[in-house]
Image: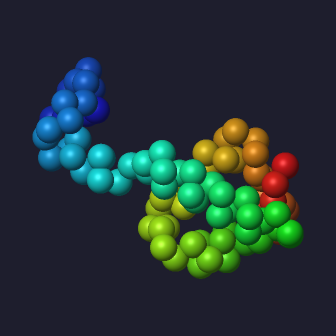
């Protein structure tokens, strides 16, 4: 955490900065649900990310994007040249 320019600070868990980060984090349960929905959505055919997001309206867009970034970093999904998300 960086607070007042001090990059050596560890997250305290009680200040406004830390509390805001907790609010925006994807919980394990949310991650699992989003992961399952994404994989199910693209199991038949690749889809654009916006279509995936539209199918998962019950979750905030930034949480879906965070899961998509993780899945891509773990090489579980990838984007085609046309921008479609597919299972690897």
Q: Inspect this view and state whether residue 17 appears.
A: yes
Residue 87 on image: x %, y % = 81, 54
Closer to the camera, 13 or 29?
Answer: 29
* Occupied quadrant, residue 80: bottom right
Figure check: 51 above or below 82:
below
Q: Residue at x 56, y 58 (%)?
A: 33
What residue lies at 25% left-to-right and 30% top-to-bottom?
Answer: 11
In depth, the one of 8 and 54 nearer the eye is 54
Rendering coords of residue 69 (x, y %): 61, 50
In percent of the image, x 14 and y 38: which residue is there? 14
The answer to which quarter of the image holds residue 75 is top right
Specify whether 27 is left or right of 10.
right
Q: How many numbered badges does the structure rendering display?
A: 0
> Which residue ends up furthest to the top in the rendered image?
8
Q: Is residue 24 left or right of residue 30?
A: left
Q: Position of residue 49 (x, y in %)?
A: 67, 68
In the rendered image, the vertical position of residue 71 relative to residue 34, given as above or below: above
Q: Nearer the viewer, residue 5 or 88?
A: 88
Answer whether residue 84 is visible to the viewer in this image.
no
Quadrant where the N terminus lies? Answer: top left
The residue at 44%/50% (across/down) is: 26
Q: Give x and y (percent) for residue 25.
A: 39, 49
User: From the viewer's perspective, is 64 left or right of 6?
Assistant: right
Would you place residue 57 above or below residue 24 in this image? below
Please, which colouring scheme is shown? rainbow
């Amino acid at each position: 955490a960086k607070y007042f320019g001090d990059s050596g600070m560890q997250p305290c868990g009680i200040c406004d900065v830390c509390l805001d980060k907790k609010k925006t984090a994807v919980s394990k349960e949310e991650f699992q649900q989003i992961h399952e929905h994404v994989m199910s959505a693209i199991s038949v055919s690749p889809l654009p990310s916006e279509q995936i997001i539209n199918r998962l309206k019950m979750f905030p867009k930034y949480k879906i994007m965070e899961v998509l970034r993780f899945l891509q970093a773990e090489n579980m999904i990838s984007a085609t040249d046309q921008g479609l998300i597919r299972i690897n």
